[in-house]
Image (cartoon, rainbow, N blue to C red):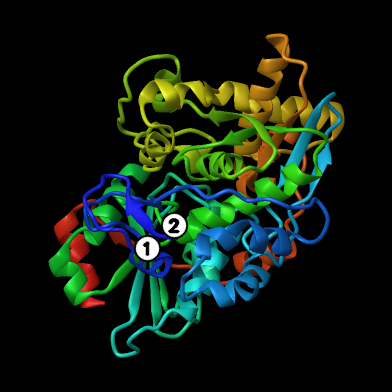
Amino acid sequence: MRYVSTRGGTEPVTLSTAIAAGLAPDGGLYVPEAMPGVTRLRGDGYLASTAARMLAPFFEGDALAPELEAICAEAFAAPAPRRELRIDGAHLLELFHGPTAAFKDFGARFLAACLQRLRRDEDRPLTILVATSGDTGAAVGAAFHGLPSIRVAILYPDNRVSPRQAHQLGSFGGNVRALRVEGSFDDCQRLVKGALGDPALQADVPMSSANSISLGRLLPQMAYFGHAALQADGPMNTIVPTGNLGNAVACLWARSIGLPIGEVVFACNANPTLPEFYAGQPYRPRDAVATVANAMDVGAPSNFERLRHLFGDDEAVRANGRAHGVDDAQIRDTIRRHAANDGEVFCPHTATAVHVFERLRMEGDRRDWTVASTAHAAKFDTVVEPLVGRRIDIPDALAAMLAREAAAEPMAADAGVFSAWLRDW
């Protein structure tokens, strides 16, 4: 299996090369040269076993292939149960049982396991760059903390993540440093992409990415959708909360290789880029709008390139998905109603997807749907607790992280300043 850039400007590379690089030299995202197919997958067994069988074609012929089962065992140690909700025809795919209580744990741990197995020059550590709108940075920090010859720079928009998210991001120390950027998530993402695409900087500071632009992050996210679909009764129609489109693309990739996944709908917050596009308007990235579902505050989703590459053109992209926008008032109302009516407490991102499910029901859609639940509500206590009228129990791993001291460094949204910081590290 070989991998090419979404922009077509580079020669095909191996999986190991694509994972180590993060971003293609022409600025595009790595994708399979041809999407494989999988057969003879069963709905029994453990998530890690399903992941290894699903991902085997993507690793074929690569130096990492003999390590795939061990990599999956490390990455998929937490469960991802699919359970019924007290809403007719609705299921919840719980992806928040990892060490930082968010779905990003699976991909971050997978990437860390891969990079540990790739040869590094110990005198020149690999610097992992990660832009985060809330959850990605903590997952990457937890996955890479303490690993030799690897260091991590986490960039997050100052005052645009929840207080507990900010504490997580700055709680690692050692080889993991947090930078609070004066700007939006899109500014953080621009800094990361600019650094990765700067040959002179790369020569001085070997770098890779741990955002969903990284193939090593996106491939494992296919696994929990595939595992859940194999256990569902018929094709699993899925609603995915999305901002940067990584999780949504992973779901579509899983469907494209043959997993029994039905329609895929994107649940967005008040950032209108994707809902407008799927409504027929030209794709128009813009600055992000701050919302209570902050991990999806993205106005220029990077993985849109992968959508276009998968389907070929904009009309084909629209024919293979839908996107619905949900504003803050609707998110808050969904959290409040379900806590009062059926005891379910959702994080703001999960509530966005639940609201989209309810909208589909109101439009007459009677099919079963699975909602991807991306984070534990305890990470968003300042939003959720006033709405549900009580304190939310904190998972043990999250509580331990919050008990540590935390610190983050200020960073201007300026490429020159960031480059100088990287060279001085």
Distance from the alpha carbon under mark 1 to that under mark 2:
7 Å
Residue closest to the eye, 127 or 398: 127
Relative to 70, 168 lies left or right = left
Residue that appears at 65% across and 37% down = 350
Residue that appears at 43% across and 24% down = 316
Residue that appears at 77% across and 16% down = 366
Residue 185: percent from left, percent from top:
37, 45
Relative to 233, 376 lies left or right = left
Q: What residue type is labelled 2?
A: Leu
Residue closest to the eye, 250 or 411: 250
Number of other residues with Cα within 10 Å of mark 1, as a class: few under 14, some 14 to 19, many 20 or more: many
User: Is the C terminus in the top left, top right, bottom left or bottom right quadrant?
Assistant: bottom left
Residue 359: percent from left, percent from top:
66, 16
Q: Is residue 233 above or below residue 119?
A: above
Task: Provide the residue designation for mark 2.
Answer: 215
Q: Determine the image quadrant of residue 123.
A: bottom left
Give residue 18's mark: 1
| Residue 171 seen from this side | no
Q: Determine the image quadrant of residue 274.
A: top left
- Of mark 1 and mark 2, the one earlier in the sequence is 1
Discs 1, 2 touching: Cβ within 8 Å: yes
Q: Is residue 328 above or below residue 176?
A: above
Number of other residues with Cα within 10 Å of mark 2, as a class: few under 14, some 14 to 19, many 20 or more: many
